[in-house]
Image: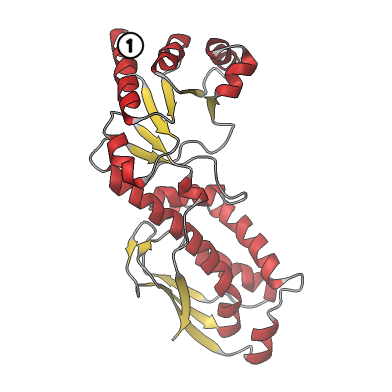
Amino acid sequence: MTARDFPTEAARRLVATALDEDLGPDGLDVTSTATIPGDQQATGHVVAREAGVLAGAPVIDIVLAGVAERTGGRPPAVDVRVADGTRLQAGDVIAVVAGATQQVLMAERTLLNIMSRLSGVATHTRRWADALAGTGCTVLDTRKTTPGHRALEKYAVRAGGGTNKRMGLYDVAMVKDNHVLAAGGVGAAFAAIRKRHPDVTIEVEVETTAQAIEALEAGARFLMCDNMSTDLLRETVTAARGWAAERGQTVEIEATGGLTLEVAAAYGATGIDWMSVGGLTHSSPIIDLALDLV
């Protein structure tokens, strides 16, 4: 991962909200300001308490700057020693922070909350990416993200070796059963989207091989196969690719619904291109990180 990949503006917005929650309207830590002299200096290590994959290291600078802005202090210096996307072991020092003790401690919980969350997403994603290695299939995320965290959680998916499916309702059209019902059929739904948004990618959800062929005949070239068994999925992949090949065309195929790490490789081996997993962002446990003064 590079600094250019990190959604800095989204991180600043999230950090601002988090610091407002933590420091209140007066930018105050009643414990630290009462017990620690304002001129006392400290060095702290951001460390991993368990193995995982790192995501969110650029947040450290953003949080420290936010605390300084609210308190009129000077942001501590930061030396990030581990890049996002790196596999961590327990005890690894991710970054060194040096500056006013009050500033460091005011920033501690906010930066750890965000980094632990993002590293949890990256770690979970890496397990899926590893399970799919060699199958030709890539794991995707979904829109099942924490409100206000989407850009950061999707960044964490990339840090873990996954790919972002779509950022929202605005960049990719996905025709699901309710759209088909409301529009009066797959063909009508596809045609309406293509007329209104001629350049947008359109994906169509299907549950059977027959529905997949119907979607292709309507013009779809991106299919999402929902809750299929491996046998049905393999049959659908073969039929869809055969239909497209006969016409000198290609089709992208995604599987979703009811997938687990235990069956990921078997589904990936059916010939699909993508596997979307909402759990990457809605069910990833955090990675335990800490900030230790040294």
Residue 24 in the image, given as x and y percentages of width and height:
73, 70
Question: Eyeballing the image, is 14 above or below 198?
Answer: below
Task: Please tell me in which quadrant of the rendered image residue 168 appears.
Answer: top right
* Apparent side of residue 186 relative to residue 156 in the rendered image (left or right): right
The residue beneath circle 1 is 243
What residue is shown at x 68% (from left), y 76% (from top)?
72
Question: Eyeballing the image, is 256 above or below 38?
Answer: above
What residue is shown at x 54% (from left), y 67% (from top)?
111
Residue 242 in the image, given as x and y percentages of width and height:
29, 13
In front here: 51 or 21? 51
Task: Please tell me in which quadrant of the rendered image residue 35 appears.
Answer: bottom right
Amino acid type at mark 1: Trp
Question: Eyeballing the image, is 175 above or below 53?
Answer: above
* Apparent side of residue 177 relative to residue 83 in the rendered image (left or right): right
Under circle 1, the secondary element is helix
Q: Tag 1: Cα neighbours inside 10 Å, few (<14), some, or many (≥20)?
A: some
Name, please, the residue furthest toward the right: 25
Residue 1 in the image, given as x and y percentages of width and height:
38, 53
